[in-house]
Image (cartoon, grey):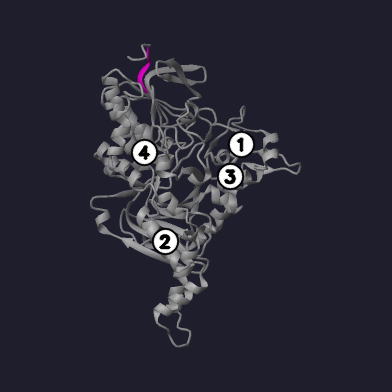
Amino acid sequence: MSDGSEVDFDVIVVGAGIAGCVTAFQLAQQGRSVVLIERGEAPGSKNLSGGVLYCRGMEKVFPDFLDEAPVERRVTRNYINFLNAESSVGIDYKDARLAGPVNAVTVLRAKLDPWLAEKCEEAGVFIMPSVRVDHVITQDGGTGKRVVGVQAGEDQLRAHVVVAADGVNSFIAQEVGLRTKPPLNHLATGVKCVVNLPRETIESRFNLTGDEGAAFAVVGDCTQGVGGGGFMYTNTDSISVGVVLRLDDLTAKEKVATEVFNHFLSHPFIAPYLGGGEVAEYGCHLVAEGGMAMVGEIAMDGLVVVGDAAGLTLNTGLTVRGMDLAVASAVAAATGIGSALDQMDTSKVGLAGYREAFFASPAGQDMLTYAKAPGFLEIERMYQDYGELFGNVLYGAFNLDDKPREHLVKVALKAFKKSPVKIRHLISDGLAGVRAL
Amino acid sequence: MKPLSVPELLAKNRFELDEEESHIEVNQAVVKATGCGKAVVACCPAHVYAEEADGTLSVEYAACLECGTCLAVAAPGALKWHYPRGGFGIQFREG
């Protein structure tokens, strides 16, 4: 090989999340020797997501994914809601076409990821749980530093390629200089709990049949005006519910993350859905929200970065994506690594097929299409003023307060006058939205 | 569902406590000089951090959910934070 040294495996994958498992699985299927190193007791034990996986990409990797994998519910109902202190205005979008073929499923990662790891093992991947990778091992090569392996405690493992699938905090990507500390407006903290409820209760409260599922996305008073939003996703017999808070705004407004979380869960719009439930687990996760701006170099000599570690998340306001991008980057990485191994060139140049394949994929193209979405979602008015404005217009229309009615246009204009939102904002934000989304 | 306190929420989780080694170290001098302690305390979803009467930032590392929010919010050099040793720390059963 290009590094000319003995290796223990063709490829070392660090992190058994979605990106790591899919990369390892596909490389093993190519006949490569692969080790998958996971710091948790078992694959999945360190992994947490909000809960919606757009699953078409996953089905290409595992054709029987929907029948075999432990997924929760098939999302057929998307509820987008502007929440105010006393009112809520929402769009309730339910569509049978979202179930045939299935577009998105809710998942619980501590249940899904062990299945993915099992598939890896069946394909011949060697899995090492309870091992934390402390550093990568580098050597000086012709084109600068080259990654040749990993160090875990006293142990060293060497490979032609190391795959950093170590999540949003990727210490590996930082160590090798592929990522610097992102600005706070590109980061959010997700705080979530899983609430157990009988499945019939969930189905009747959310108006679902069988394994249909609902995904609620909420902005406004749910986060006490902090940029971000609330979410509520139905699992088979539990609900994943929580908030995602942009860190620049959370710190600027001096709010306490857990107080915002509790405010959302006890909000009169949310609380009835959770009534009688029992908290099964509480967790949190850092979210990279910079979109394309967070994606820098994703390969160097002897190493590629995939999934969250590569900054691959995408919040378009309507869909919040990460896991499907992890799948797409893993598939592209396995392709790129495969051809690099075939050509016996695992330098950055040899691995260039990864970046090419990723940005040629539908998910990669979406990263480019939505490059302006994060800026749009930073518009302050989204998180309070619009919701109140919509609520006040509708209140004016529905509240028959024993006074003569006015035309809706007049009601709307009056609500505008009271609102900090001006017509010009509506136009500029609308245009920004059209350009970004 | 009545709202639970953070300790009550954390009690629902399974932790494999590393009794020998904390994965978080605070550089009190940097915290003091930059005043970043308040933000770190407010952002941590597990209430790992607390500001003590003498102005220092104390750490209850056993409660850590390993999200990395503190490291993102803290001033450079204020925290030394890495993942717990293999097999230790939070072990999600739901995720």
Front: mark 1 or 4: 4
Q: Is residue A322 left or right of residue B29?
A: left
* Residue A257 visible in image: no
Q: Residue at x 60, y 47 (%)?
A: B7
Residue marked by disc 2:
A428
For disc 3, the marked residue is B44
What amino acid type should be assigned to the residue bearing mark 4? Ala
Q: Are marks 1 and 3 in contact (CB under 8 Å)?
A: no
User: What's drawn in magenta, residue-wise?
Assistant: A6-11
Chain that bears disc 1: B
Q: Which mark is residue A326?
A: 4
Q: Are marks 1 and 4 on the same chain?
A: no
Task: Quote the CA–CA distance across marks 2 and 1.
Answer: 46 Å
Labelled disc at residue B61: 1
Q: Secondary structure at mark 4?
A: helix
Q: Is residue A276 above or below residue A336?
A: below
Residue B36, position as x, y percentages in the image: 64, 42
Crowding at dot 2, Cα within 10 Å, few <14 / some 14-19 / many 20+, comes out as few
Query: In 3D space, how far apart are the residues under numbered discs 4 and 3 (Cα atoms)?
Result: 26 Å
Q: Chain of mark 2?
A: A
Residue B5, percent across and down?
60, 51
For the residue marked with disc 2, what is the amino acid?
Ser
Where is residue A82, by image quadrant?
Answer: bottom left
User: Looking at this view, is B51 or A410 the one in front?
Assistant: A410
Q: Earlier in the sequence, mark 1 or mark 3?
A: 3
In the rendered image, residues at marks 3 and 2 fall on the same chain? no
Residue A84 magenta-highlighted: no
Callout 1 secondary element: helix
Label 2 SS: helix
The percent coordinates of residue A226 (x first, y second) are: 53, 55
